[in-house]
Image (cartoon, rainbow, N blue to C red):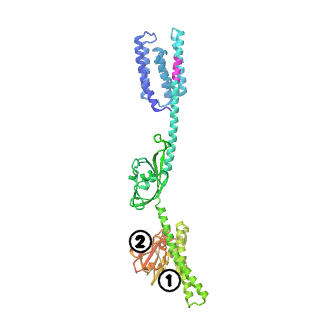
Amino acid sequence: MVERRIREVIRIAGVVLPCLLIIYGILQSISTTHSAQPSLYFSLVMISWLGLSLAMFLFPAQKSQDAFMRIFAYHLCAAAYVLFISDLQQPYVSLAWALLLLVSYIYMSRKGVILNISVLLLVAIADILLTSDTDESIVVNLVAVSSILIAGAIMIALIRVQQADSDELNRSKAQESLQSGRMNTLINNLSDAVININDEGKIELYNAACLNLLNTNSNLQQQLIDSVIEVQDQSGKPVKLFQLAKKSRGVKIRDDLSLGVDDEVIRLEVTASPVRNSYSQTKGESAVEGYILILRDITKAKSLEEERDEFISVVSHELRTPITIVEGTLSNVQLMVERGKTPPGTLERSLADAHEQILFLSRLVNDLSTLSRAERGIADATEKINIKSLIHSLYEEYSPQAKKKQLLFDIDTIGKLGTITTSHLYVRELLQNLITNAIKYTNEGSITLRATKVGKNITFEVKDTGIGISKSDQSKIFKKFYRSEDYRTRETGGTGLGLYVAEKLSRKLGTTIEVDSRLNHGSSFAFTLPADESSSQEKS
């Protein structure tokens, strides 16, 4: 396809050239007595040609058929000009006809060339027949026709070369655009922020993840990287990303940086890499044209890493104590059995101590197992649960533990409770954690397990008369490994996982745990689940 600017040049030339030919024709008619140039023919041809040129300029052809008719009309005007005003021997006429051949090729390709050559040969023959000196006219016209064809062929060849170069350039641009589009799509679909800066530290390219990381919709183009992203190291000292990138001869990674965004601290891993061209003529080697920065949010990963370290530390400490006690107790029992002289009750007490520590380890393993199941979504399957049966089974399981501490363990299931449909494992584990927690921190008094139907919901409550929880601690008790600084809490062994697991299970069940507690006046933990609509009658 011909470039639009070439068509514009042709439209302008289509007006200018006829005007020049008209002027030349007027001057020629004044200075010659050519019998084939009557003023009437001259006027008709020039007016027709000029009108056609103006129409072509003002109203460009929109269809191929329209273009063909206009080109054909141009040929008729050109033929009339040669036959009635001038002749093919004139250099400017030959040049004009060669240009007409080029225009025909541009608009009509091969058909235009055939049309132009056909009309040219007919005009040459007609000019020979109208000329008295036939032999000389034949030779001159053959030379003129040959010149026109050679000139036209040269111009067509140049245009074809130009078209080939233009097509190749367009293909290269299309391929480059395709590759650029693919690259932009790839970069914009990355979850990590990618930023390209030039050798002055100004941002030239960035992806959607960068805007998401910075929580902004502003245009970052040509802004200095250090004015847009201000990071710090672990000591709070500012770190210039541009300087970090400039110091990197290869890929440089730092994972000790942080970024403040909207009162939130984001931990970052920054990867900096220089962008080099293939060769620099000035330096004689590859030169750095810019840098690529990849910013990865590792806040969660760092938190998990820190929690893992804390978890290993706490669990190791909690395991060490009971294992040491069990080991020492069993060693003493073994020694006493070997000696055969043991005071009455000593073996029983030692074995009881060892058994208590084994139970502690069992509870720890159970908490970890429950936490693991909740984290992985195991046991999410729901089933219909009879509420009274669940409450009574929990009473039978934990009343011996309460009785051992001389605590009164009551249940309250007055009225028709019906059933609920949810994960049986999660509900039971949640209530078990609340009950064991109440028994652990209650030294005297009672513990009550209550289930109440209010409207379409069932409220479960575990209430105790234990040591209670201070206001400052109530907002922290559901955190992993958290234990109150109260000395009475510290006297009681525990990992700080019980209420964390309970809160995790409550979220799995789609509910929240409500806490009501006063220091030295006991605590109440409650949560609500929807009752089954079909359970209007109590199930036995």
337 and 102: which one is in front?
A: 337
Q: What secondary structure prevails in the magenta region?
A: helix
Q: In this view, does 280 lie above or below 311?
A: above
Q: Is residue 122 visible?
A: yes
Q: Is mark 2 on a helix, strand or loop?
A: loop
Residue at 39% over, 79% down: 519
Q: Is residue 304 above or below residue 223?
A: below
Q: In this view, does 472 lie to the left or right of 355?
A: left
Q: Residue 62 carries which label?
A: none
Residue 524 position by quadrant: bottom left
Residue stretch in magenta: 144-153
Q: Mark 1 points at which residue?
A: 402
Residue 150 lies in magenta, yes or no? yes
Q: Position of residue 232 (x, y in %)?
A: 41, 58
Residue at 52% over, 29% down: 160
Q: Mark 2 points at which residue?
A: 475
Q: In this view, does 158 lie above or below 35?
A: below
Residue at 43% over, 19% down: 21
